[in-house]
Image (cartoon, rainbow, N blue to C red):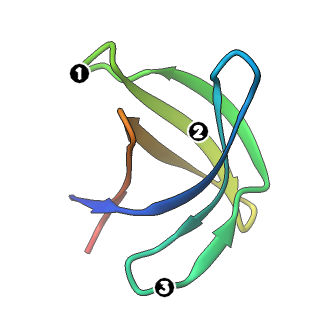
Amino acid sequence: MRKVPVGVLTQFGSSGDAHPLSITWEDGRVYPIESIMELRPARTSPTRFRYTVRIHGQNTYLYRSGDRWYMESME
């Protein structure tokens, strides 16, 4: 697997929580995030987060490290 940097349209709550609304894949395609199923610290670091999101009816992982976002690709 490789990490693919993605653009994320993000809404921030009053407490500073990041809520991703859509992702922009590396080729420019935009995918709306239908729902956020879960948010947890990533196993590798407490400053990284793993979001379980629903896109096109399928659950997938979206990762945030600071102000950078990425997903994993099987390509």
Residue at mark 3? 28
The quarter of the picture where the N terminus appears is bottom left
Q: Nearer the viewer, residue 8 or 37?
A: 8
The amino acid at mark 1 is Thr
Q: Relative to residue 1, is residue 74 drawn left or right?
A: right
- Name the mark nearer the viewer: 3 or 1: 3
Q: Percent position (x, y) of residue 18?
A: 62, 33
Q: Percent position (x, y) of residue 28?
A: 48, 85
Precedes in sequence: disc 2 or disc 3: 3
Q: Which residue: 25% across, 75% down?
A: 75
**Dot 2 surroundings within 10 Å: few (below 14), some, or many (20 or more)?**
some
Q: Percent position (x, y) of residue 50?
A: 46, 32
The amino acid at mark 2 is Thr
Residue at mark 1? 44
Q: Nearer the viewer, residue 58 or 45?
A: 45
Q: Percent position (x, y) of residue 72?
A: 33, 56
Label 3 to label 1: alpha-carbon separation: 29 Å
Q: Secondary structure at mark 2?
A: strand
- Which labelled disc corresponds to residue 19? none
Label 2 to label 3: alpha-carbon separation: 22 Å
Image height check: is 1 above or below 45? below
Label 1 to label 2: alpha-carbon separation: 16 Å
Q: Secondary structure at mark 1?
A: loop
- Which labelled disc corresponds to residue 52? 2
The amino acid at mark 3 is Gly
**Dot 3 surroundings within 10 Å: few (below 14), some, or many (20 or more)?**
few
Count of marks overlaid on the render:
3
Precedes in sequence: disc 1 or disc 2: 1
Kindly indicate the quadrant of the structure image that contains residue 74.
bottom left
